[in-house]
Amino acid sequence: MNIRIEKVREILKKNGLDGLIVTKQQNWQYLSGFTGTNAALIITTGDQYLVTDFRYLEQAAEQAGGFHIIKPFALVEDAVVDQVKKLGLGRLGFEDDNLTYHLYSTYKEKLPGVELVPLHETVENVRRVKDQGEIASLRKAAGITDEAFDYILEIIGPGVREVDIALEIEYFIKKKGAQKSAFDIIVASGPRAALPHGVATDKKIQAGEFIVLDFGAVVDGYHADMTRTIILGRPSQQHCRIYDLVLRAQERALEAIKPGVKCSAVDLAARDLISVEGYGANFGHGLGHSVGLEIHEKPGFTPKDETILQPGMVLTVEPGIYLSGWGGVRIEDLVLVTGDGIEILSKSPKNLIEL
Ligand SMILES: [Mn+2]
């Protein structure tokens, strides 16, 4: 029995649905194991079907145990239509934040007797709490990310371009067995460190500059995410003051995380401290987000997210202070919520490293 699919079936039952069409890649991977790029699942109350194309038939048979594999003559959507008719499904759920308007129109036209019911983030909600296998993948991804940080410290020096640092990180994590980089690597030095998403450019790094490094490895589809800020040369008093404040805010938030606590309360733990010290306006993003098969998942540590933390959730904790024209600091760890607190999956040091 596939527990993940059974959880989806409970939601079908609650909504009086005969089935669900799954059209989002991470969701079909989560439910079936299939990693191809063109597919749809039909999950009914008693069975499950995977439709894909000729390129993936063998792979689908290997990966998606327990699924009937259906090969369309032409388009995946046509085979979905045929199968829905054959099964005689009356009320059919679809993923409202994923199905394109075009596909929705196609299904509506070709399935006139079927009631199409929008479901919002249904599989995503099941994905919020990670199981042991997922946690193992995230732990591995975080481990490779730590190794890459250690490695890159050897390479960073005066005159080195941001983009070369990013390339070295990417090459390293792939060599270590990661599938890919979790996102476009952020290497933001000097005044560019004030850009929260300063993807690496050809700017050369100079003495006296903060360097924000934000990256992660992907293992089995699971994303690690870590940020460290280091300095080339000696830090000024201002560098030390801002760095220390971000670090204290991050540690305060980490201490606040445990099952039963609201996400918003964790955000507040860090935000309060930064605000009291006068930098509230310079911390303009949420404190963190969940990660898994996607780099940004829910719930998040934001002022408005009232989700209650549960064991098995995996989130980032990443306060930052950004001062336009001067630079910025962000420190980010990947964290697993455990039965009574947290396990920090990111192990890289957090003292201010001077290169
Ligand atoms: Mn992040």
Image (spheres, rainbow, N blue to C red):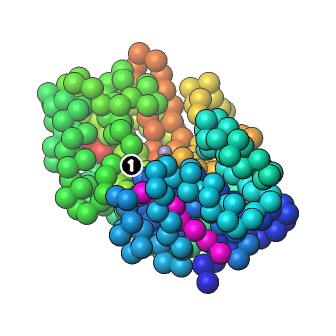
Residue at image point 35% right, 31% down: 199
Question: Which residues are drawn in magenta?
Answer: 47-53
If the image is split into quadrants, where does the C terminus sit? Answer: top left
Looking at the image, the residue that sits furthest to the bottom is 1
Instruction: Give the percent coordinates (x, y) of residue 30.
Output: 53, 64
Residue at image point 61% right, 35% down: 102
Instruction: Give the percent coordinates (x, y) of residue 203.
Output: 23, 23
Above or below 243: residue 322: above
Neighbor class of circle 1 (other Cα within 10 Å; few <14, some 14-19, many 20+) is many
Residue 9: quarter of image: bottom right
Above or below 113: residue 326: above
Q: Can residue 69 be found in the magenta stretch?
A: no
Q: Where does label 1 land, which residue? A: 182
* Most frequent secondary structure within the magenta stretch: strand
If the image is split into quadrants, where does the N terminus sit? Answer: bottom right
Determine if residue 229 is in view: yes
Residue at image point 51% right, 40% down: 246
Q: Is residue 2 left or right of residue 156?
A: right
